[in-house]
Amino acid sequence: MIKITNLQASIDEKPILRGINLEIKAGEVHAIMGPNGSGKSTLASVLAGRDHFNVTGGSVEFMGKDLLEMSPEDRAREGVFLAFQYPVEIPGVSTTNFIKTAVNETRKYRGLEPLDAVNFLKMMKEKMKLVNIDQSLLSRSLNEGFSGGEKKRNEIFQMAMLEPKLAILDETDSGLDIDALRIVANGVNEYRSKDNAFLVVTHYQRLLDYIVPDFVHVLYNGRIVRSGGKELALELEEKGYDFIKNEFAVTEEA
Amino acid sequence: MYEENDDILEQVTSSEYKYGFVTDIEADSAPKGLSEDIVRFISAKKKEPEWLLEWRLKAYRQWLNMVEPTWPNVKYPTINYQDIIYYSAPKQKIAPNSLDEVDPELRKTFEKLGISLTEQKRLTGIAVDAVMDSVSVATTFKEELAELGIIFCSMSEAVQEHPELVKQYLGSVVPATDNYFSALNSAVFTDGSFCFIPKGVRCPMELSTYFRINAANTGQFERTLIVAEEGSYVSYLEGCTAPMRDENQLHAAVVEIVSHAHAEVKYSTVQNWYPGDKEGKGGIYNFVTKRGICLGDHSKISWTQVETGSAVTWKYPSVILKGDKSVGEFYSVAVTNNYQQADTGTKMMHIGKNTRSRIVSKGISAGKSHNSYRGLVQVGRKATNARNFSQCDSLLLGDKCGAHTFPYIEVKNNSSIVEHEATTSKIGEDQIFYCNQRGIDTETAVALIINGFAKEVMNQLPMEFAVEAQKLLAISLEGSVG
């Protein structure tokens, strides 16, 4: 589905990603872990097309197309979804109206007719159950005055509505209590299928108890330094990130 | 067109100038410039009664002794009042017999605004008075409204048909000498709408006036007067557009509203005069005086304005709350882009007891524009328990524009409560990116955010126009982000 080859990116001349190689196939869930400042969120942002990062090298192929050539909105319409670590507030724009605009813009791109009010509502009702979200929340201004948990649930709800091929979850677990975490994870698991894929960016192993990954990668200093199965996450949990730091601090010097 | 102007110039400069009026009385335009003779010319053209001519002349003489205000937060080159044509009638025959005779260009612009003169749209029940340059070209639904005793016609017609009403109310809310531009308007006003709702009648449809400046070098000075008798109701909408021209044109209108006891007048404006080009060349100077008086107890006046046009805007739709328990409202969205300047707001003058007013102002600035809110809330000595709530929000797009707020509060009664809230925000890159990431392109995202910001005001607009006004906001800001 997505093939990342030697991806390099910098911000203000400072390199953050120093050559990422990663391939994700349909039906797979990959987790990216790593200490603070390792480049996890940068990877998520670069894939989504945030323009304050400069891509300085490498390539990303998504469903056979050059992802890096596309505008952020076209990436979204092609099926790349980013669940934000810090969802943005837009006063005066109801969540329903926002999602309706998003769904119909995406449908337009794909050559489909816009959903009428009845069908849109039907779809919404269905997806609302997925993350236990309330109608009243959706008629409020987007993310304005939402609790941390409500914001994250809203992200997953939007994901379900937009039906992406690849969903990137950027620290979706941050700021969630255990109940909210369970609800969010449940939404993800419900959506998970053989046709889509997930890239789960997280600092803690905790989320991976609920969203069980097929592969775990450790990002450090802008590179994937270790890859393995879900047991790698447990190993990290047990040993902490220091052993990675120590191990690779040495090789960096060399 | 230019040749025509040269001819007019020649006329003005020729020695026969003064007599030109007499011989040229059937001409489409008056010569450039302002003088007592021009005032007489306009009055004669409109076959006005003597008292109105005197009223105009008095205003003109007073105007001569007044100075143009300099306190607004706007800059523009000095206006040469002798370089303006004060009367211009479109070439088409005045008062066409059927709507088919109305200029198709005019109709097209109507349709763009969601206001149509065509038969099929008439079924939606909006009565329209169309004013081009100096004269009213068509008024729809007149007969239907007349059955209810409602008078809806051009000001010129009202002067002829209902002189007693015009005489009673003209200048009763905005006296000729109120300010520089109202004095000018009183001297040279050419047309506008007149609307009278008799006692106890609820006007069954939206009344609407559509103004268009068409001819070059012409000023537009229209005068609108709305009178709502006891217990009546009317919702009124005005729309304005002008063609693109390199030179600036002056628009100095006066709107007066009288609301008697238990009456309600809702006045909505979608102002889309030509704002000038991207470099700030051309555009309309929109210097307008709008004021209503809640004369009787329990009366209400509500102003809603969506201001997207004009190079320079200077207007403060106001309400004098004279009757006890009367209510005044002001809802405004003002958008400025490129080099546009707007200094707009309201005045709420609480005189009666238990009067209430509400001000919601949303300013959106983009490009190199400047957008000012200027408001005055005045509570008089006898206005026991007066209440005001004001909210002024500014939204900035980019970092070269300015938003300014000048709220004035004068309270002379201890029992009153006056509240003022203000916010300034910017459309963030984060917000745009968030929208982009959901498949929404930047233009659509800006429109979405802007409309969210302005929603509280847009909700006040009559349904038929809200959608068009939303589109207008988006169009006005096209290319201002990214």
Image (cartoon, coloured by chain):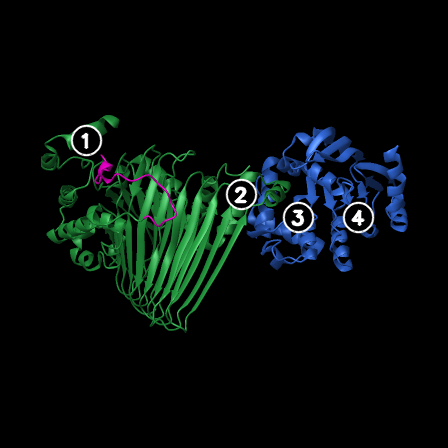
Chain colours: A blue, B green
Quarter assignment of residue B14: top left
Residue named by callout 3: A158
Direction from residue A220 to residue B228 in the image, left or right = left
Q: Nearer the viewer, residue B61 or A74?
A: B61
Q: Are marks 3 and 4 on the same chain?
A: yes
- Image location of residue A94, percent across then percent down: 57, 52
Bin the neighbour count of mark 2 within 10 Å (Cα to Cα): few under 14, some 14-19, many 20 and up.
Answer: many
Does the magenta segment cover residue B84?
A: yes
Q: Which residues are magenta?
A: B70-91
Residue named by callout 4: A203
- Image location of residue A148, percent across then percent down: 69, 56
Judge whether residue B302 can be spotted in this image.
no
Above or below, B186 against B3 in this view is below
Secondary-structure class at tag 3: helix
Foreground tag (1 vs 2): 1
Residue named by callout 1: B8
Q: Amino acid at mark 4?
A: His
